[in-house]
Amino acid sequence: MRVVVLDYGSGNLRSVERALQRVGADVEVTADSHAALNADGLVVPGVGAFAACMAGLKSVQGHRTVGTRLAGGRPVLGICVGMQILFERGIEHGQETEGCDEWPGTVERLEADVVPHMGWNTVKAPEGTVLFDGLDAETRFYFVHSYGVRKWELEPSDTLPAPLVTWANHGCDFVAAVENTALSATQFHPEKSGDAGAHLLQNWLKSL
Protein backbone atom coordinates (compact mmCIF):
# COMPACT_ATOMS: atom_id res chain seq x y z
CA MET A 1 0.00 0.00 0.00
CA ARG A 2 1.16 3.51 -0.85
CA VAL A 3 0.83 5.89 2.10
CA VAL A 4 1.52 9.62 2.26
CA VAL A 5 2.53 11.21 5.57
CA LEU A 6 1.40 14.81 5.24
CA ASP A 7 4.18 17.30 5.88
CA TYR A 8 2.64 20.54 7.10
CA GLY A 9 5.36 21.53 9.53
CA SER A 10 4.19 19.52 12.51
CA GLY A 11 4.63 15.97 13.70
CA ASN A 12 7.14 13.19 14.10
CA LEU A 13 7.36 12.77 10.36
CA ARG A 14 10.36 10.46 10.15
CA SER A 15 9.26 8.37 13.13
CA VAL A 16 5.86 7.87 11.49
CA GLU A 17 7.53 7.10 8.17
CA ARG A 18 9.76 4.44 9.72
CA ALA A 19 6.89 2.89 11.68
CA LEU A 20 4.79 2.54 8.52
CA GLN A 21 7.72 1.14 6.55
CA ARG A 22 8.24 -1.41 9.34
CA VAL A 23 4.78 -2.86 8.65
CA GLY A 24 5.22 -2.94 4.89
CA ALA A 25 3.89 0.37 3.57
CA ASP A 26 5.41 2.28 0.67
CA VAL A 27 5.70 5.69 2.35
CA GLU A 28 6.20 9.22 1.02
CA VAL A 29 6.54 12.26 3.29
CA THR A 30 5.29 15.28 1.36
CA ALA A 31 3.15 18.42 1.41
CA ASP A 32 2.08 17.83 -2.18
CA SER A 33 -1.73 17.75 -2.34
CA HIS A 34 -1.81 15.66 -5.53
CA ALA A 35 0.24 12.90 -3.93
CA ALA A 36 -1.83 13.12 -0.73
CA LEU A 37 -5.10 12.86 -2.64
CA ASN A 38 -4.02 9.86 -4.69
CA ALA A 39 -2.32 7.70 -2.06
CA ASP A 40 -4.04 4.58 -0.75
CA GLY A 41 -3.85 6.08 2.74
CA LEU A 42 -3.10 9.50 4.18
CA VAL A 43 -1.57 10.00 7.63
CA VAL A 44 -1.91 13.39 9.36
CA PRO A 45 0.52 13.53 12.32
CA GLY A 46 0.70 16.43 14.74
CA VAL A 47 2.73 17.73 17.68
CA GLY A 48 2.35 20.94 19.65
CA ALA A 49 -0.46 23.46 19.86
CA PHE A 50 -3.84 23.04 18.17
CA ALA A 51 -3.78 26.56 16.65
CA ALA A 52 -0.28 26.15 15.21
CA CYS A 53 -1.16 22.78 13.70
CA MET A 54 -4.31 24.16 12.08
CA ALA A 55 -2.35 27.08 10.65
CA GLY A 56 0.23 24.69 9.23
CA LEU A 57 -2.44 22.41 7.81
CA LYS A 58 -4.19 25.29 6.06
CA SER A 59 -0.89 26.57 4.67
CA VAL A 60 -0.62 23.42 2.52
CA GLN A 61 -4.39 23.14 1.94
CA GLY A 62 -4.34 20.01 4.07
CA HIS A 63 -7.83 20.61 5.46
CA ARG A 64 -9.19 20.55 1.90
CA THR A 65 -7.19 17.44 1.08
CA VAL A 66 -8.60 15.63 4.10
CA GLY A 67 -12.15 16.69 3.23
CA THR A 68 -11.80 15.67 -0.41
CA ARG A 69 -10.41 12.27 0.48
CA LEU A 70 -13.18 11.58 2.97
CA ALA A 71 -15.85 12.71 0.51
CA GLY A 72 -14.57 9.97 -1.79
CA GLY A 73 -14.25 7.36 0.97
CA ARG A 74 -10.44 7.44 0.89
CA PRO A 75 -8.79 6.49 4.21
CA VAL A 76 -7.23 9.09 6.52
CA LEU A 77 -5.46 8.45 9.84
CA GLY A 78 -4.86 11.30 12.30
CA ILE A 79 -2.25 10.98 15.07
CA CYS A 80 -2.07 13.01 18.33
CA VAL A 81 -2.78 16.67 17.44
CA GLY A 82 -3.46 15.30 13.96
CA MET A 83 -6.48 13.67 15.60
CA GLN A 84 -7.45 16.73 17.63
CA ILE A 85 -7.66 19.06 14.61
CA LEU A 86 -10.26 16.76 13.07
CA PHE A 87 -12.74 18.00 15.68
CA GLU A 88 -14.84 21.16 15.55
CA ARG A 89 -12.69 23.35 17.78
CA GLY A 90 -9.78 23.52 20.17
CA ILE A 91 -9.38 25.74 23.22
CA GLU A 92 -5.87 26.38 24.52
CA HIS A 93 -4.86 29.16 26.93
CA GLY A 94 -8.27 30.74 26.45
CA GLN A 95 -7.85 30.87 22.67
CA GLU A 96 -10.48 29.11 20.56
CA THR A 97 -9.44 27.81 17.14
CA GLU A 98 -11.64 26.23 14.49
CA GLY A 99 -10.66 22.70 13.51
CA CYS A 100 -11.52 20.64 10.44
CA ASP A 101 -15.00 19.93 11.88
CA GLU A 102 -15.13 16.32 10.71
CA TRP A 103 -16.57 15.54 14.14
CA PRO A 104 -18.37 17.85 16.57
CA GLY A 105 -16.58 18.35 19.84
CA THR A 106 -14.03 20.44 21.70
CA VAL A 107 -10.39 19.75 22.44
CA GLU A 108 -9.71 21.14 25.91
CA ARG A 109 -7.28 20.79 28.78
CA LEU A 110 -7.35 17.50 30.64
CA GLU A 111 -8.72 17.59 34.18
CA ALA A 112 -5.85 15.83 35.94
CA ASP A 113 -3.46 16.45 38.83
CA VAL A 114 -0.49 15.90 36.54
CA VAL A 115 -0.44 17.43 33.07
CA PRO A 116 0.83 16.63 30.50
CA HIS A 117 -0.30 13.03 30.33
CA MET A 118 3.04 11.50 29.35
CA GLY A 119 3.79 7.80 29.22
CA TRP A 120 2.15 4.44 28.71
CA ASN A 121 -1.54 3.82 29.27
CA THR A 122 -4.20 1.27 28.49
CA VAL A 123 -7.33 1.99 26.44
CA LYS A 124 -10.90 0.70 26.34
CA ALA A 125 -11.72 -0.25 22.77
CA PRO A 126 -15.27 -1.12 21.65
CA GLU A 127 -16.43 -4.36 20.07
CA GLY A 128 -15.97 -4.47 16.33
CA THR A 129 -12.80 -2.38 16.35
CA VAL A 130 -10.45 -2.74 13.40
CA LEU A 131 -7.52 -0.75 14.76
CA PHE A 132 -7.26 -2.74 18.01
CA ASP A 133 -8.13 -6.16 16.58
CA GLY A 134 -5.83 -8.78 18.07
CA LEU A 135 -4.70 -6.58 20.96
CA ASP A 136 -5.83 -7.40 24.51
CA ALA A 137 -7.21 -4.99 27.10
CA GLU A 138 -3.87 -4.71 28.91
CA THR A 139 -2.02 -3.43 25.84
CA ARG A 140 -0.38 -0.08 26.50
CA PHE A 141 0.20 2.81 24.12
CA TYR A 142 2.39 5.89 24.44
CA PHE A 143 0.70 9.24 25.10
CA VAL A 144 2.12 12.78 25.24
CA HIS A 145 -0.58 15.47 25.54
CA SER A 146 -2.16 18.04 27.81
CA TYR A 147 -5.39 18.43 25.86
CA GLY A 148 -8.02 16.02 24.63
CA VAL A 149 -11.68 15.45 23.81
CA ARG A 150 -13.47 14.71 27.06
CA LYS A 151 -16.98 14.40 25.61
CA TRP A 152 -18.14 12.63 22.46
CA GLU A 153 -20.80 14.89 20.92
CA LEU A 154 -21.76 13.27 17.62
CA GLU A 155 -25.46 12.45 17.71
CA PRO A 156 -26.56 8.96 16.59
CA SER A 157 -27.79 8.69 13.00
CA ASP A 158 -30.49 6.48 11.54
CA THR A 159 -28.66 6.29 8.21
CA LEU A 160 -24.95 6.25 9.06
CA PRO A 161 -23.05 3.66 11.14
CA ALA A 162 -22.03 4.93 14.57
CA PRO A 163 -18.30 5.65 14.93
CA LEU A 164 -16.34 3.32 17.19
CA VAL A 165 -14.88 5.40 20.02
CA THR A 166 -12.02 4.17 22.21
CA TRP A 167 -11.46 5.80 25.61
CA ALA A 168 -8.58 6.20 28.05
CA ASN A 169 -8.29 7.82 31.47
CA HIS A 170 -5.83 10.27 32.97
CA GLY A 171 -7.59 12.12 35.75
CA CYS A 172 -10.65 12.12 33.47
CA ASP A 173 -11.93 10.05 30.59
CA PHE A 174 -10.87 11.24 27.13
CA VAL A 175 -11.14 9.98 23.57
CA ALA A 176 -8.12 7.83 22.76
CA ALA A 177 -9.13 6.76 19.24
CA VAL A 178 -11.98 6.99 16.74
CA GLU A 179 -12.90 4.74 13.83
CA ASN A 180 -15.46 6.32 11.52
CA THR A 181 -15.58 4.53 8.14
CA ALA A 182 -12.69 6.07 6.13
CA LEU A 183 -11.58 8.38 8.95
CA SER A 184 -9.55 6.96 11.84
CA ALA A 185 -7.51 8.70 14.51
CA THR A 186 -5.50 8.05 17.67
CA GLN A 187 -4.61 10.44 20.50
CA PHE A 188 -1.60 8.31 21.37
CA HIS A 189 1.47 7.83 19.18
CA PRO A 190 1.45 4.42 17.47
CA GLU A 191 4.89 5.21 16.04
CA LYS A 192 6.24 5.43 19.62
CA SER A 193 4.25 2.47 20.97
CA GLY A 194 6.54 -0.39 19.98
CA ASP A 195 5.02 -3.66 18.88
CA ALA A 196 1.53 -2.59 19.93
CA GLY A 197 1.72 0.49 17.73
CA ALA A 198 3.10 -1.55 14.83
CA HIS A 199 0.20 -3.99 15.19
CA LEU A 200 -2.31 -1.13 15.10
CA LEU A 201 -0.69 0.42 12.02
CA GLN A 202 -0.69 -2.95 10.31
CA ASN A 203 -4.41 -3.30 11.10
CA TRP A 204 -5.01 0.10 9.51
CA LEU A 205 -3.01 -0.81 6.41
CA LYS A 206 -5.02 -4.00 5.98
CA SER A 207 -8.21 -1.94 6.01
CA LEU A 208 -7.17 0.36 3.14
Image (cartoon, rainbow, N blue to C red):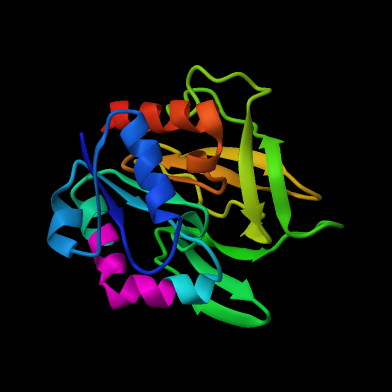
Residue under the image location 55 percent in, 49 percent down: 187
- Percent x, y of residue 56: 38, 74
Vertical comparison of 149 with 126: above or below:
below
Residue under the image location 40 percent in, 78 percent down: 55
Q: Is residue 27 left or right of residue 198?
A: left
Q: How many marks?
A: 0
Indicate yes or no whether the magenta region holds residue 55: yes
Residue under the image location 77 percent in, 60 percent down: 115
Q: Which image quadrant for residue 21?
A: top left
Residue under the image location 19 percent in, 41 percent down: 40
Q: Is residue 99 left or right of residue 105?
A: left
In-front residue for pair 194/150: 194
Q: Is residue 168 left or right of residue 101?
A: right
- Percent x, y of residue 147: 65, 62
Q: Which image quadrant for residue 26?
A: top left
Q: Is residue 33 visible?
A: yes
Q: Which residues are magenta?
A: 54-66
- Percent x, y of residue 14: 38, 51
Indicate the quadrant containing the C terminus: top left, top right, bottom left or bottom right: top left
Q: Looking at this rendering, what residue extends furthest in the right direction?
A: 113
Indicate the quadrant containing the N terminus: top left, top right, bottom left or bottom right: top left
Q: Which image quadrant for residue 161?
A: top left
Q: Is residue 98 visible?
A: no
In-front residue for pair 134/118: 118
Magenta portion: prevailing SS class: helix
Vertical comparison of 203 with 18: above or below:
above
- Percent x, y of residue 114: 83, 57
